[in-house]
Amino acid sequence: MIRRTVSALIVMSVLAMPSGAAAVDIKKIDAAVVRVLMQADVLVTLANGKVIRKKRGGTGTGFVVNKSMVVTNLHVVYPNKPGKGETNVDIIKIRVGIRVRGIDKISEVEVIKSDPAADLAVLRAEGLKTPILPISQVTPDKGLKVHSLGFPGMGDRGDKLSWESSLSSGIVEKLEKWSKIPSGPPVVWVQHSATVRRGNSGGPLFNDCGEVVGVNTLVRGAEIVTHGGKAHVVDASLSFASHASALTKFLKQNGYPFTSIDAPCQPTVVPAATWLTPANMVAIAASVFALIIALLNRARITSAASTIVGRPPREPEPPNGKSPSQPTPAPTQAPKIEKGWQLVGSDGRGRPLRFTLSAAEFAKAGGNLVIGRDGNIADLVVGDDDVSSRHLRLTMAGGGIVAEDLGSSNGTRIDGRALAPYATEPLPVGTTLAFGGSRVSLQAS
């Protein structure tokens, strides 16, 4: 027994030694990532020919490439894409601002150049005192570990914006070359598995050396089909970043300075043996020796005490580690069935709707499930024209479900009562939830 204990101590000491690991300086990279905010006055031409004036707002991510410039996506700062029922959008006025980490204010910036083909834009922001992100010129291999920093809108609480970026990691899945705009030049795109959501657009995709390998631009949403009245996700979403070569070309063509890295990434590794100084080795040896002496003394004391009280010394353990008289362990209890709910009803056309809600589903979606019309930005998709792209959010809280309207166009009603935009309300089992022309009831499953 003592021999096994000593061996275990030695093994644990070896396993506890620091191992070599890539030292990615996330804090430094995070300091170079900014949140981008946009407000615009636009003239929208509707399908019936009517022209109306609207205000549009948006948010995204950007990163610093030199002391006076930030890179982001063009679609973050120029909202000219027509929506449903619209044929054209004319920009009247745009205001763009950024918020730098550690500075408690939004600074107005100017859009000075754009590249529609690669969906890139450069913002002029004088006097930046942040780190600068270098840009890798090396084509990333399939399987390369990559990371994403950005500001997904799902992390906001209504009109209370989050100023803390979100980090996710993944790998390069493949590279493809295609055109994002009709008749536009093809661009190399990096398909990767790091999580990207709406609001991450324009943020950096970087390697273990902190070098930008791409600019996060778009997500192709999950494919959802309805079968037997139930919605099923048949294919997960895909994240795409424009390859750094497009950014490099764009910056060079316009004479904008940036830091270029031509060599392959070789992450700084903290050597496992840097702490093995002679003094540390002597201290470790002394500690192990002291533990051995203590265990031997404990064994002698235990044996002597057993003799004094008339208790026989502890018998050695048999080879299989079990005493013949050891009781058979109780059978493992069956796992508890996970509590869950279902939303059951129909959409505005009378088609059946059924969504399963469980702790596992909430966990997969990052803690909340969004009901909406657009599969790119909603988790539970409803094909109802009166439902907004992101209509309402469901969250697990206090052992139940809480609903929050996300500023939807046609509102949300709970048992006939209007739910104020960005207000939250618990949903007891049996509650009727109406959004757009759809109506569902919450049932326990």
Image (cartoon, grey):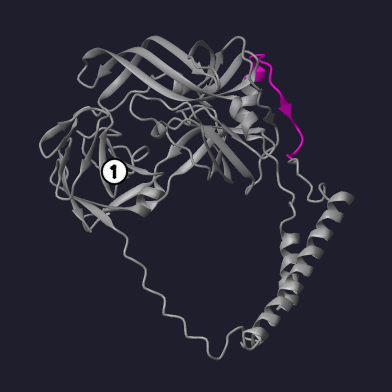
Which quadrant, please, contains the N terminus? bottom right
Please rate how many residues cluster around mark 1, counting C-alpha atoms within 10 Å: few if below 14, some from 14 to 19, many from 20: many
Q: Is residue 385 above or below residue 94?
A: below
Residue pictured at 35% horizontal, 53% vertical: 359
Quick check: 423 above or below 266? above
Q: Is 253 colored magenta in this rendering?
A: yes
Q: Main secondary structure of the magenta part?
A: loop
- The answer to whether residue 352 is seen in the rendering is no
Residue 234 in percent (x, y) is at: 37, 54
Magenta highlight range: 251-265
Quick one: which residue is furthest to the left in this view?
A: 416
Question: In terms of depth relative to the viewer, which is nearer, 102 or 349?
Answer: 102
Residue 397, image quadrant: top left
Residue 364 as seen in the image, left or right of residue 373: right
Residue farthest front in this picture: 308
Q: Quadrant of residue 379?
A: top left
Q: From this view, report whether residue 68 is shown above or below residue 190.
A: above
Instruction: Give 279 or 238, whichever is nearer the viewer.
Output: 279
